[in-house]
Image (spheres, helix red, strand yellow):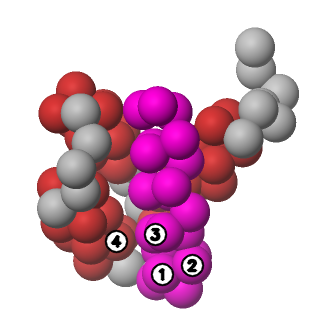
Amino acid sequence: MSKFQIKSIFEQIAFEVFSMRDANQAKQFITEFVSSKNIKDEDKKVIIDNVNACKNISRIQSYICNSLLKYEGMSVNK
């Protein structure tokens, strides 16, 4: 079940994040959004840690895109 909740989280934030140009603004938005959702704490931590590790907006957007693909079963990595 957690798999679908994470997918839902990424789908919900993707449009907003892809329209952003500032990495810090995106990190804050994602952190606040994910923290407010009712998903497992360990899933929240993974998402927030991964986003905070990103150095720029392009990397954050890539992370969101790759995560969407992964949870939809279309990842190139197995």
Residue 49 position in % (x across, y down): 26, 38
Callout 4 amino acid:
Ala
Report how far apart the C-alphas of labels 3 and 1 lie in the structure. 6 Å
Report how far apart the C-alphas of labels 4 and 2 lie in the structure. 11 Å
Q: Is residue 7 magenta?
A: yes
Mark 1 sits on what residue? 16
Name the foreground residue: 22 vs 4. Answer: 4
Name the foreground residue: 31 vs 25. Answer: 31
Residue occupying the point 44% across, 56% down: 9
Bounds of the magenta segment: 1-20
Callout 2 amino acid:
Phe
Residue occupying the point 82% across, 36% down: 74
Which numbered disc covers residue 15? 2
Secondary structure at badge 2 equals helix
From what the image shows, is residue 33 above or below residue 9? below
Residue occupying the point 27% across, 42% down: 39
Mark 3 neighbour density, 10 Å: few (under 14) some (14–19) many (20 or more)? some
Secondary structure at badge 3 equals helix
Mark 3 sits on what residue? 13
Cβ atoms at labels 3 and 1 below 8 Å apart: yes
Residue 24 position in % (x across, y down): 26, 70
Cβ atoms at labels 2 and 1 below 8 Å apart: yes
Residue 63 position in % (x across, y down): 54, 48
Secondary structure at badge 4 equals helix
Whichever of labels 4 and 1 marks the residue nearer the N terminus, that label is 1
**Residue 53 visible somewhere in the drawing:** no
Left or right side of 21 for 37: left
Callout 1 amino acid:
Glu
**Rendered image quadrant of residue 45:** top left
From what the image shows, is residue 10 above or below residue 63? below
Residue 70 position in % (x across, y down): 67, 35
